[in-house]
Structures are given as C-alpha cells and as structure tokens.
Amino acid sequence: MSQKIVSLTVRDVRFPTSVEQHGSDAMHTDPDYSAAYVLIDTDSGLKGFGLTFTLGKGTEIVVCAVEALAPLVVGKSLQEIVSDFRGFYRLLTSDGQIRWLGPEKGVIHLATAAVLNAVWDLWARAEGKPLWKLLVDMDPKQIVSCIDFRYITDVLTEEEAHDILVKAQEGKQQREDEMLKGGYPAYTTSCAWLGYSDQQLQQLCTDALQSGWTKFKVKVGADLEDDKRRCCLIRQMIGPSNTLMIDANQRWDVAEAISWVSSLAEFNPLWIEEPTSPDDILGHAAISKALAPLGIGVATGEQCHNRVMFKQFLQASALQFVQIDSCRLGSVNENLAVMLMAQKFQVPVCPHAGGVGLCELVQHLILFDYICLSANLHNRMCEYVDHLHEHFTSPVVIQDAHYMPPKARWNRKESNEEEVQSFGYKRFAFLKCCGLKVLSVWA
Ligand SMILES: [Mg+2]
C-alpha cells in the first residue's frame, strides 16, 4: 500500500454568513465564513480532505498559496511522509524560496495548514480511524517525531516532550472511555454575536439554556454602554453560577483594554479574549497582570501565527488560556508542539472554533489533549458555534453541551450520491458552480 499522492486540488468555498450577521464582532463586522478546501488524491483511490478558514475576500490568495505548495506534496507517498513527518513539515515551511512569504505566518502558513490538514486526514482514513483516535493510539515517540522543535528547544526539548507524554500514559484508557461516554465540555458563542439584537440574544440564550449549555461567550468592544447592557442581560439570564466569557477580537490598545474590561468586571467574566493586537506579547502580559486581581484571565491564540509566538506568550505569563486553532497553526504537527508547551506551563488549552469546519477539526485535538496530555478538565472547554455544520459529511455531535468523539471509520465509500443530495446545497448555488458537493474533514 504505497498511497502515492497523484494530485492536489484546492477550491475557494464561501458562505454568505454576513447577510444575517453570524460571526460578527468588534473588528470583523461582516464575515462571510469561507475556506480554502484541499483535496488530495492517491493512486489507490483513497482521498484526503483539509481546509483552512477565512472570512471571505482574499480566499483566492490562500488558494494561490496552496497551489504554490502543491509540487512539494504531489509524488510523495503517504508512507514516505508519515515515516518522517517532521521532515515533511519542514519541507513545506522551509522551502528556500517560498519561506520568504512567511516564515510560518500569514497566508502561506494558512495554506500550509490546509495542505497538512488534508495529509493528516489521508493518514487517518488509511488507518480507518477518526483523527483523534489515530493520535491517541500513537506512542509518545511517534507523536514527538511529528513535531518540529526548531525555535522552541529553550522551553521544550524533544526529550521533555517525550517525558510529558510518557507520564500521561497512566489512566489513558480510562479517559478515552470517559470521553466516549460523556464527551468533552463545550461553550457556545452563537448566542451573542455583536450584530445580534437584544431580543435575538435573549431568545438564543433561552434556547441554549434549555439545551443544557452552561458556558457562554459574548462579543464586546465596540461600545462600552452596549457591552454593559448586553453583559448584564446575559448574566441575568444565565445566573451567577454559569460561566461567562467576553471577546474583544483585538479591538483595544493596552490601557484601554484594562480600563474597559475593569468596567465589565461586575459581570464576572472568566476571561477576556483577544483584548489587543495578537502580536503584542508584552501588552497581553500587562493586561494579564492588571486584570489578575479582578479574577479575569486573558485568552488568545486564534490569530497567533505559530509555536514561537505561543512559546513567548507562555514565557511572559501573557495568557491564562491557550486558544489553539486547527487552521491557523501548521496543522496537527504544530498544534502538538503548542499543546505540549501549554501542558509544561500548566496553562489550560481552550481551542478556538466556529467558522466553517473549525469545530469539526479542533474537537480531535482537544480529545487528544485530555486523553494523552492534560488529564484535567478544570477551566477547560472547547468553543462551539452553531453554523454551517450541515455541509459536512460528519458534522460535530453535541450532547448536553459536550463534544461527542467522532466514531467514524473510513472504510466506506466517500461522498455517495444519496449523502450528497441530503446536504441542501441549493441554498448556496455558487457551490455548485465550483463543483463542490460536500465537505469532509477528519471525522
Ligand atoms: Mg475569538
């Protein structure tokens, strides 16, 4: 079974979510959830699917970047890649010419994520396992062999990473059983997008409470009086014991962030997410220090370029919640590095999700984090956003506000016609134009 990759194609897929203000926040007021969607074909007929997430305009640039990486992938066999995954990661991220476009950041790194996500998908399908199970079944040595430790050995060496993974082997089966039974805790962002009216917020919040949700995130940062009103409304509805988080999506300067969030402290948020520029490590450290006495942590990561940035955030005590992203970092490989560093610093990982496909992807990583690394659920939860799941062959399954582990096995034939017809693409006529039938990733 060589599984030689014979082609890599990429499509620009967009959903008009801005029409109803889904996903709107203080900086991204009219997002159209979109993706650069990668399909890898092999000589055996097995396919791998991957994507990276965007907000609409510019997806065509990511598509170009994926096409620039394709020659590094086509012609390789799956076996060749996974027997030296660290080397393959480096091949994609360190090409002597393409590297200039990053390195490991921006559009080229989004493209790297899409390509590598498809390669991991191919591997999981070849093994007949959902991705989380592929990872959980790998031994510590194999996990470590997938990670590029360049630039992070001052904080985490290969040997340390190996030791952390070995130590966490104890109780692994028990945690896997626990996850299969009850799932991983989730919180919802879908009730309180910035563009939603108070009435809509109240209705969605009522529905969410009835469905068993206990953790809620509110978008803030455009207008302080509006934020106070909205936070008051939602706190009154969810009561004092449920969890509230707030998210400013990079709206403020450092001093402004401190004073604005202090004004919202009465609503007892667990964290303020992305208070300022995602690149400002020392700014986040200053905000963390100022808000600590109020019991408010800082969360960030959805636009954190790479493991080197996360390393510095952790070194500087600039965040109290690590928000990995399945499509911003260099796929599973780089997310493994970040989860291991977070474990070393004992900072909880609470993944960013939402958009299109992010929930479907990141659920696999957080299951691995719990089963094979953290063994801890205190202040740990994965974001959930209730949009566009119907476009996936295996949409996430939420049960009692928990992500239920995907159990799919990929021995069956992909994308049969019956399945395709049940996904309602008529609503998105442009999808038909690009020939896309159904989205499929990792599950
Ligand atoms: Mg956010």
Image: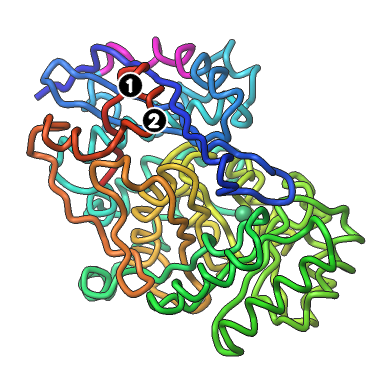
What residue do we see at 60% from left, 65% from top? 321
Bounds of the magenta span?
66-76
On the image, which quarter does residue 289 sit in?
A: bottom right
**Which corner quadrant of the image does residue 5 belong to?**
top left
Residue 432 - label: 1
Residue at horizontal 59 percent and vertical 30 percent from the top = 104
Rounded to the nearest angstrom, the CA distance separating label 2 from label 1 is: 7 Å
Residue 230, horizontal then vertical, whole percent: 71, 71
- Amino acid, disc 2: Phe
Q: Position of residue 437 (x, y in %)?
A: 26, 27
Ligand 1 shown in quarter = bottom right
Image quarter of the N terminus:
top left
Pick the residue in front: 198 or 139.
198
Magenta span: helix, strand or loop, mainly? helix
Horizontally, residue 390 falls left or right of residue 198, namely left
Left or right, 434 with reference to 103: left
Quadrant assignment, res 76 = top left
Label 2 packing within 10 angstroms: few (<14), some (14-19), many (20+):
few
Residue under the point 49% across and 60% down: 383
Identify the residue at horizontal 77%, vertical 52% (top origin).
281
- Do residues under tags 2 and 1 come within 8 Å of each other at their CB atoms? yes
Please provide percent x and percent y for residue 26: 73, 51
